[in-house]
Image (cartoon, rainbow, N blue to C red):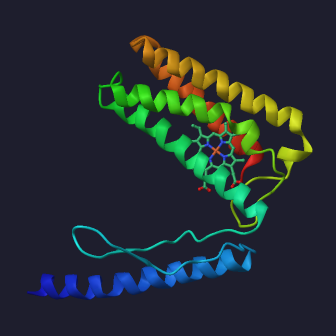
Amino acid sequence: MTAHLTFTRRSAFAPAAAATAFAALFFLMSAAGDSVAQTSPTILQGPWGEMREESPAGPVADPGDAAIRLRQQSMRAVSSQFRTIEALYLAGTPFTPLSQAAARTLHDLGQRNTGLFAVEAPRRTPFGAKAAIWQEPKEFAEHVAEFSLATGRLLQAVETSATERLQSELAAVRYQCLACHYHYAF
Ligand code: HEC
C-alpha cells in the first residue's frame, strides 16, 4: 500500500516537472531568436477514425531557417543510419539488407553536405552551425571530403561482408563526425 502511494505521488509529479522543464527550454530557444512558427495539432481522417497529429515543427518562411532545418534533418538522418549499422554490428548481424541500405544512405547523405551548407546561415539557437564554416570554406570542405571517403569505405566493407574491417571503418566514420562537430558545430 505504501509502495502504491509513493508510486502515485511520483507519477503525478513527474509530468508537471517535465512540462516545466519543456516550457523553460522552449522559452530559452524562443529568446535565442528561433523564428520558426509553432503549429496546432492536425486531425487526420482514415479508416480507423480520427487521429490527432501533434506537429511540433511548424512551417518556416525565412530562407535561413529553411536551410537550417534541412541541414538538421539531414544530420538526424546521418545519425540514424550510422547508429543502425553500429547497432546491427553490436548485435552480431552486421550484413543484412537493412545495414546495406543504411550504409548506402549514409554515404549518399555525406556526399550532399557541400550543397547543404551552401546557404550561409549560422546557428540561431544555442545549438547549431558555427560561422567558421563560411569563414574557412577550404578547411570545412576537407572535413566534408574526408567524411565522404570514410562513409565510402564503410559502405564497401558492408557490401563485401568484410567482418575484419567493419569495426575500424565504423570507428573511422565516427571519428569524422566528432572532428567536424568539434570544429564546426555547437
Ligand atoms: C562535415 C561536418 C560534419 C560531419 C562530418 C558530421 N556533422 Fe553532424 N553536424 C554538423 C554541423 C555543422 C551541425 C549543425 C547544423 C545546424 O544546426 O545547422 C551538425 C548537427 C548534427 C546533429 C544535430 C541535428 C539537429 O537536429 O539539430 C546531429 C545529431 C549530428 N550532426 C550527427 C552527426 C553524426 C552522427 C555524424 C557522423 C555519422 C555527423 N553528424 C557528421 C557537421 C557535421
Tell me where residue 97 appears, x and y as whole percent. 35, 26
Tell me where residue 171 appears, x and y as whole percent. 54, 27
Which quadrant of the figure has residue 41?
A: bottom left
Side of 143 relative to 108 (left or right): right
Quadrant assignment for the N terminus: bottom left
Tell me where residue 186 appears, x and y as whole percent. 71, 55
Residue at 73% across, 55% down: 67
Tell me where residue 55 appears, x and y as whole percent. 48, 71
Residue at 51% across, 21% down: 155
Side of 95 relative to 9 (left or right): right
Q: Residue furthest left?
A: 1
Residue at 66% across, 26% down: 148
Total number of numbered discs in the rendering: 0
> Where is 181 relative to 13, above or below?
above
Residue at 50% across, 81% down: 40
> Where is 41 relative to 82, above or below?
below
* Nearest the eye: 185 or 48: 48
Which quadrant of the figure has residue 123?
A: bottom right
* Nearest the eye: 186 or 111: 111
